Image (tube, helix red, strand yellow):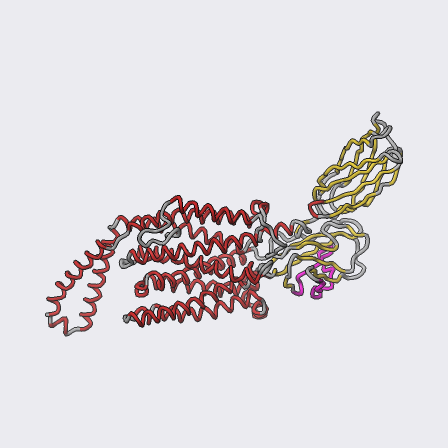
Amino acid sequence: MSATAPYAGPSPIRRPLAAAALLAALVSLVFGLLLAGAGPASAHAALTGSDPADGAVVDTAPKEVTLSFSEAIAVGDDSIRVLDPSGKRADTQAEPKDLSEGSTVRYGVALHSGLPDGTYTVAWQAISADSHPISGAFTFSIGAPSDTTVALPSQEAGGGPVGVVYDIARYAAYGGFVLLVGGSAFVLVCWPGGATAQPMQRLVVRGWLTLTAATLVMLLLRNPYTGSGKFADAFDLAGLQSVLDTKPGAALVSRLLLLGAAALFIAVLFGTYARREDEREKKDLTFGLAVGGGVVATGIAATWAMSEHASTGIQANIAMPVDVLHLLAVAAWLGGLASLLVALYRTPDIGSAAVRRFSAVAFGSVVVLAATGIYQSWRQVGSWSALTGTRYGQLLILKVALIAVLLAVAWFSRRWTGRLTDSAVASEDVAMASEDVAEEEPASGSESVSADPERAAQLARQRAALTATKKKRIRDADPQRSGLRRSVLAEAAVAVVLLAVTTMLTSTEPGRTEEEAAGGTPSASAPAAGGPVNLKMPFDTGGQNGKGTVRIDIEPGRTGSNDLHVWIDGSDGKPMDVPELKLALTLESKDIGPLPVVPDRLAEGHWSASAVQIPMAGDWKIDVTVRTSDIDQVTIDKNAKIG
């Protein structure tokens, strides 16, 4: 519903231009702060390096393979596997050794001695500190590359059918939380009379059931989701026990315990509270329910904050309470919106005062969402390049756009709210009450009815249903109320999409981490198969006979071992000898190099170097230093894609 201003008589924020200016300022502030930058932050862990490197060709078999990560991870016995060309285990199959030092996170596995030459595959799988499974694979070669029967895994950890069901449960959990918390808050704060309305009761109870069922599904699927990817392992007791020992498992169990307290809260809200007639007692009970419900809602929200993005990276002690506030604001806004939609369509009794109170709640929620969203965006993205060049950043842009659309629709809802009145309905209620009294008089004189309590109760229910139907028909005929219903329905439709995008953000690698990972070793790539590289670079050392052309061939032009040939032609096109020739290779995007290459002279104007190692594919800068005399020298460079 209205999220731009509460309505209580003349409102200070009523004009469209004021609302648009507020929205523009908030959006500008969000994206402006993205440029402020901060220290390194991670959420999903990423592989940042390995020894041997991806695609490397080493002369002798290493004693161990080590992997470096951007943040702390949880590993098991088979988290790192090394397979020989035939697919057999080349490592000792012991639990990976923790070789971390300071801020460097590194794990290693020992290899068998006497490994033959060939291409080896390293496959790894772990759980990052924000609870998401990560995996990858790469290869290195001993002696020289060879054919291998090992296929690099195409499915990432957390994928497949189990991943799909787990993600659906994640979305359902957020939806259930929104309905449970937002619906309860709507009844307590905006419409206390809704506690007796069955549609409102069903909405909140269904929210509780959805959140509880989704949490149970996530707890059971946690083991296969982070491991085998098989549904059958959901009932593996040993796997379930291992899940309970992890931070995500503890968070899910804590959520189930808090949902038990939430069930008691619902029973009191729609039981004792709904039946309470004394205003003073009801006021005291409202305060107690607000405090108790707030504690339970905060605890449930904290189960997400303590186990996902907010729990790791920079300023985690600030990010977690901010994340809790963000979730509570989302629930108050979107859950209240769903409650208002149900009330407008399914109940005849909600009045304009309740709608206007929700307008104030929605405005406050949007303010909290803006403040917490700015901080979260800065923390998880941090730069324009990450905002536009990563999936997380693109989803964030989509989320901001959806919020803008939601606020625009809410402005129309606020206009309908301003026109909403209860006067016509109140007069019709009086008329219907008079009709009910007139209908009851002959019935009260009927001895047969008074003698049959069951029949009297049945008639009373019929009269109540008839009265409710009349009141609903009258309210439905109100054009202001009809316009408000349509507007709120449009808001709810946008809110469903917004909730889906928000859920996707929680399972997407943040932009900061993705950009950091781009500076490390690719986590799942085979040796790049490139082609021969041919370069031609003119030079001029400035001295006598100092002009010429350098021609370079690199074969086979891929990661691993390469042969490099250099020819120098003079200005007359004939082979030209020089006193000194040096080369260096640099992969600036990965901060690798310069790797020096000193070729040997084979013939006049022809130099060669064998077994030149290219550790990974990329856009390599090749620097060539040519000295034509004791004092005349020049360094030229050119980029070439290798691999």
Count of picture labels: 0
Q: Work out which residue is located at the far top of the displayed protein and give it.
A: 572
Residue 29 is at least partly visible in this image: yes
Please report the bounds of the magenta region as a residue range. 76-101
Q: Please tell me which residue is depicted at 25% across the width and 54% down the height of the picture.
A: 475
Left or right placement of residue 211 versus residue 538 in this view:
left
Rendered location of residue 547, percent (x, y) = 82, 29
Rendered location of residue 6, percent (x, y) = 36, 54
Left or right placement of residue 555 versus residue 517 in this view:
right
Rendered location of residue 173, percent (x, y) = 47, 60
Left or right placement of residue 369 versus residue 599 in this view:
left
Q: Residue 96 in magenta? A: yes
Would you say the magenta stretch is mainly helix, strand or loop? loop
**Quarter of the image that includes the C terminus:** top right
Residue 492 is at least partly visible in this image: no
Rendered location of residue 577, percent (x, y) = 88, 33
Q: Please tell me which residue is depicted at 37% across the width and 70% down the height of the picture.
A: 267
Asked where in the image residue 104 lies, by quadrant, the reply is bottom right
Q: Residue 298 in magenta? A: no
In the image, is residue 14 above or below residue 242?
above
